[in-house]
Image (tube, rainbow, N blue to C red):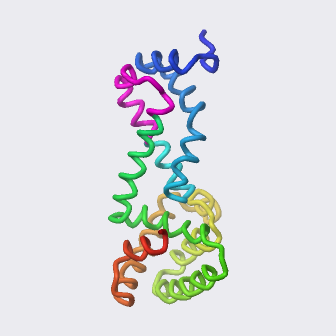
Amino acid sequence: MTTYSMLSDQDLRAKLVSGDEYAFAEFYERYSAGILGFVKKFVHSADLSEDLTQEIFIKIWQCRSKLADIQSLKAYLHIVARNHTLNSLKKAFRSEVAMSEIVNSFVEERNSTEDELLNKEYYDYLQKALAVLSPRSREVFKLCREQGKSYEEVATALGISRNAVKNHMVASMKILRTSVERDLGISLGVLLVILLK
């Protein structure tokens, strides 16, 4: 049996093109951590980065015949990763789930005194906006947003599915979207562009 970890990228690429699943497993093992870090620079969210990384590798596998024409496996992977991530970010402004991932994580990137004051105002605003949520949705939002827990961690802590956690965050984001548009007169997308720039 071939020791896949010993293969050069060139040989690995040839096996990928032929549909070798063991080669794909090695390809994923070799590059997934780097791609995860690369994607996270764009989206600043562990959950969303993991989802996008999975999608990127699935896309490579589904279009593996194209690999026959490329020179560098690593360079091609980064181009696919960048394009897929940027396209997903464009869609994020139309998706409450993706938006909640970004909102959940952007505050962690801010750390100056001025930003801390902004965060407090943002936090106070959120508390008012989210006061109408069900107790469980508020609990999920606090665990995700204030404690920085991943969807998996929250699901385990509360004994519910990851999908249920997402659904609660969707509900929270709908409330927030409505409140921001009503109180600030701008869309949530515009607010996030300002906060994330």
Is 6 drawn above or below residue 75 in the view shown?
Answer: above
Along the viewing direction, whichever of 143 and 119 lies nearer the viewer: 119
Query: What is the chief secondary structure element of the magenta stretch?
Result: helix
Q: What residue is at 54 percent from the left and 78 percent from the top?
A: 138
The quadrant where residue 94 appears = bottom left
Is 16 drawn above or below residue 111 in the view shown?
Answer: above
Q: Is residue 60 left or right of residue 142?
A: left
The quadrant where residue 55 appears = top left
Q: Which residues are magenta?
A: 56-76
- Mark count: 0
The quadrant of the picture occupied by the N terminus is top right
Is 97 drawn above or below residue 128 in the view shown?
Answer: above
Asked whether 67 falls inside the magenta stretch, the response is yes
Question: What is the x, y in percent for residue 142?
Answer: 59, 75
Asked whether 143 falls inside the magenta stretch, the response is no
Question: What is the x, y in percent for residue 145?
Answer: 57, 71
Q: Is residue 181 left or right of residue 194?
A: left
Q: Is residue 120 left or right of residue 21?
A: right
Question: What is the x, y in percent for residue 168?
Answer: 47, 70
Q: What residue is at 60 percent from the left and 18 percent from the top?
A: 4
Q: What residue is at 63 percent from the left and 59 percent from the top?
A: 153
Q: What residue is at 45 percent from the left and 42 percent from the top?
A: 81
Question: What is the x, y in percent for residue 102?
Answer: 49, 65
